[in-house]
Image (tube, grey):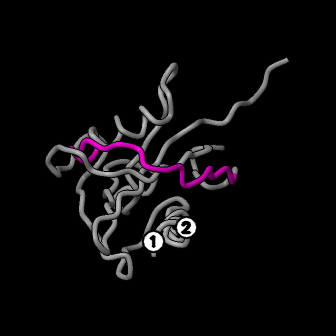
Amino acid sequence: MTYKIPNITVDAVLFEDDSILLVQRKNQPFKGKWALPGGFVEYGEKTEDAVMREMVEETGLQTKVSALVGVYSDPNRDPRGHTITIVYSVQRCGGTLQSGDDAAAVKFYKVNKLPQLSFDHDIIIKDTIQRFVK
């Protein structure tokens, strides 16, 4: 029997003051739209390592995982197919902010002035604010 298996991704939420770090997508889907930094988990990779790798690749920042935000598994959240994302809150611990890899740009946005977001990242950010921001 053959099973269809969803893809697994990770996303990072990095708050600094009253702003959140977003990347402008360089590729489809949602090319040109803003998103949380993240990407696909590689085979044999822990999700915590994947989110830190993606942060370096897309934003130039070295981070450490501070908390699990949640798991988002709506089969329709990604137009490429069923993709489950594991979202972590991260803290900056080094590096220089610069866009790279799949990011056309990288920028901190005030949480009350966010651009239009891709995927379900608006829901993820709202959930994170409710859980972690006081």
Compared to residue 14, the image places residue 6 above or below, namely above
Question: Start and end of the magenta stretch?
Answer: 58-74
Where is mark 2, residue-wise? Answer: 131
Other residues around mark 1 within 10 Å, as few (<14) / some (14–19) / many (≥20)? few
| Left or right for 99, reference 123 | left
Tell me the residue at 66%/36% (across/down). 6
Residue 93 in magenta stretch: no
Q: Position of residue 21 (x, y in %)?
A: 31, 61
Q: CA distance from mark 2 to mark 1?
A: 6 Å
| Left or right for 49, reference 92 | right
Q: Secondary structure at mark 1?
A: loop
| Residue 133 marker | 1
Q: Position of residue 90 (x, y in %)?
A: 38, 50
Compared to residue 114, the image places residue 89 above or below, namely above
Amino acid type, mark 2: Arg
Q: Secondary structure at mark 2?
A: helix
Question: Is the residue under label 1 in contact with that under label 2 (CB below 8 Å)?
Answer: yes
